[in-house]
Image (tube, grey):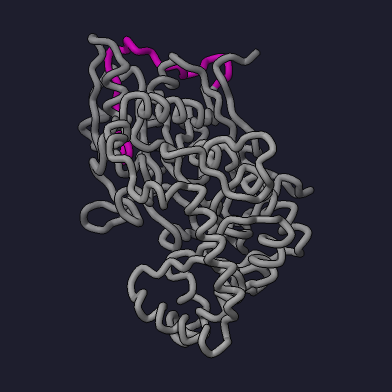
């Protein structure tokens, strides 16, 4: 997270006062560290859920990245929708003011999440004035009000005039917001530099994104027999079968928060799909047969050198991604759920098979599936540059990625802690194979 802050805002010079926002110049933008705090540790991983732990664990595990961000001069911190031991973060004065601002010395401003104040009471949005009072007094400095901002302004003004929100609190918020705006140069240059538009998505940016894909892929299996690996694949193979819902779909590669809130399938942006990348990588003599959905007729063909099956999750964001089964499946045009496991199994029974899994998290990998496939790569959500996948599976680059999380055997094991005495993963935290075994 710290590297992202420096990448957006620029590297603060030696001696920059700890906790104060920093923006290097007009070609930089303010960064936001979120979601403060414990958002990644909610009970059972539920979105907007409750993180249950003592303060010492909250500080040691969940607060540590914010210390690094604050040391890098991060300008803003966003409060989490989630709760800590039942206390909603948007109204938790202890964490937002006493800890973040006072103890950690954060001098930028705290911003609410989208309609974060509305969520402080059920039904959502009721007793709105009380929600505003709770959040502002807790330490929220800037409020994200996407729709009825006039109502918000009216009610906040009434709260200040009635003394329910002290002027000292308003002055603190204004001071913090102005501090960030001055640092960012918004008063001298209130508008973005449109001459930079052509650099967005330029060749160097796409090359960097492709490199990121290469380095993030994790090789989980390579060969039914370790002495006979399937990867790297032969670029001059006679005939390759490419199958699966995720083989030729940029939207699926990008996932949620791409173009729209939840994301979508299809050619949603400029980029290279896995199928297109394979076609670019192989030799002129290689024939590629692509089928989104498998058919008996396709499998009756002979002389496939190997198959590449690309399956995974459909795009999601926030609560639409809450999932208690975590199986590989997709929805067809009629709304019917099609299990990716069946596609993989059918192909792997007949042809040496590489599976490329596109997902935002580990999914269930059944033992029978793992026994059948010859190679397995988790590509996470590689985004627009599918060429990074072809670079590695065809051997132009070696695998470098390691699992940033434990890969469970069954969902019943979750949550699975690598420090637990009962730790029994399918693939442990940090696992990842390479071509070079030295």
Q: Residue at x 23, y 30 (%)?
A: 298
- For residue 28, above or below residue 143: above
Q: Which residue is drawn at 55% across and 16% down?
A: 435
The one nearer the camera, 208 or 319, is: 208
**Residue 88, position in %: x, y?**
59, 72
Quadrant where the image shows the C terminus: top right
User: In the image, is residue 90 part of the stretch drawn in magenta?
Assistant: no
Q: How many marks?
A: 0
- Tell me which corner region of the image, top left, top right, bottom left or bottom right, holds residue 197: top left
**Residue 117, position in %: x, y?**
49, 74
Residue with the most extreme front position: 188
Quick check: 389 left or right of 165? left
**Residue 205, position in %: x, y?**
37, 29
- Tell me which corner region of the image, top left, top right, bottom left or bottom right, holds residue 126: bottom left
Segment colored magenta: 225-247
Q: Residue at x 61, y 73 (%)?
A: 138
- For residue 70, above or below residue 223: below
- Residue 399 in view (yes/no): yes
């Amino acid at each position: 997270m710290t590297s992202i802050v420096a990448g957006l805002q620029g590297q603060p010079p030696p001696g920059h006062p700890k906790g104060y926002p920093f923006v290097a110049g007009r070609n930089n933008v303010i960064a936001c560290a979120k979601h403060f705090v414990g958002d990644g540790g909610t009970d059972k991983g539920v979105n907007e859920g409750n993180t249950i732990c003592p303060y010492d664990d909250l500080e040691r595990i969940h607060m540590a990245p914010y210390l690094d961000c604050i040391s890098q001069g991060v300008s803003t911190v966003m409060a989490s929708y989630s709760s800590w031991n039942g206390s909603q973060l948007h109204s938790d004065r202890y964490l937002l003011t006493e800890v973040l601002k006072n103890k950690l010395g954060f001098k930028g401003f705290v911003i609410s999440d989208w309609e974060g104040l509305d969520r402080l009471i059920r039904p959502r949005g009721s007793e709105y004035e009380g929600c505003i009072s709770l959040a502002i007094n807790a330490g929220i400095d800037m409020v994200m009000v996407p729709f009825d901002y006039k109502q918000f302004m009216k009610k906040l003004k009434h709260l200040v005039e009635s003394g329910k929100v002290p002027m000292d609190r308003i002055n603190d918020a204004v001071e913090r917001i102005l501090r960030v705006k001055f640092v960012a140069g918004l008063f001298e240059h209130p508008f973005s530099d449109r001459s930079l538009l052509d650099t967005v998505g330029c060749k160097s940016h796409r090359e960097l994104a492709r490199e990121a894909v290469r380095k993030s892929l994790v090789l989980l299996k390579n060969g039914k027999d370790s002495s006979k690996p399937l990867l790297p694949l032969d670029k001059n193979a006679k005939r390759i079968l490419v199958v699966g819902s995720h083989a030729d779909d940029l939207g699926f590669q990008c996932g949620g928060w791409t173009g729209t809130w939840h994301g979508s399938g299809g050619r949603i942006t400029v980029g290279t799909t896995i199928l297109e990348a394979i076609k670019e990588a192989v030799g002129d003599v290689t024939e590629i047969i692509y089928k989104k959905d498998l058919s008996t007729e396709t499998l009756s063909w002979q002389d496939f050198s190997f198959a590449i099956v690309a399956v995974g999750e459909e795009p999601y964001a926030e609560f639409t991604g809450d999932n208690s089964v975590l199986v590989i499946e997709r929805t067809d045009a009629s709304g019917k759920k099609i299990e990716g496991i069946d596609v993989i199994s059918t192909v792997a029974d007949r042809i040496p098979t590489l599976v490329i899994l596109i997902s935002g998290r580990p999914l269930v990998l059944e033992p029978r599936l793992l026994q059948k496939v010859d190679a397995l790569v988790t590509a996470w959500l590689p985004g627009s540059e599918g060429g990074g996948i072809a670079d590695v599976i065809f051997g132009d680059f070696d695998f470098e990625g390691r699992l940033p999380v434990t890969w469970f055997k069954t969902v019943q094991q979750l949550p699975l802690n690598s420090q637990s005495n009962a730790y029994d993963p399918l693939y442990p935290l940090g696992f990842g194979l390479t071509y070079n075994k030295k």
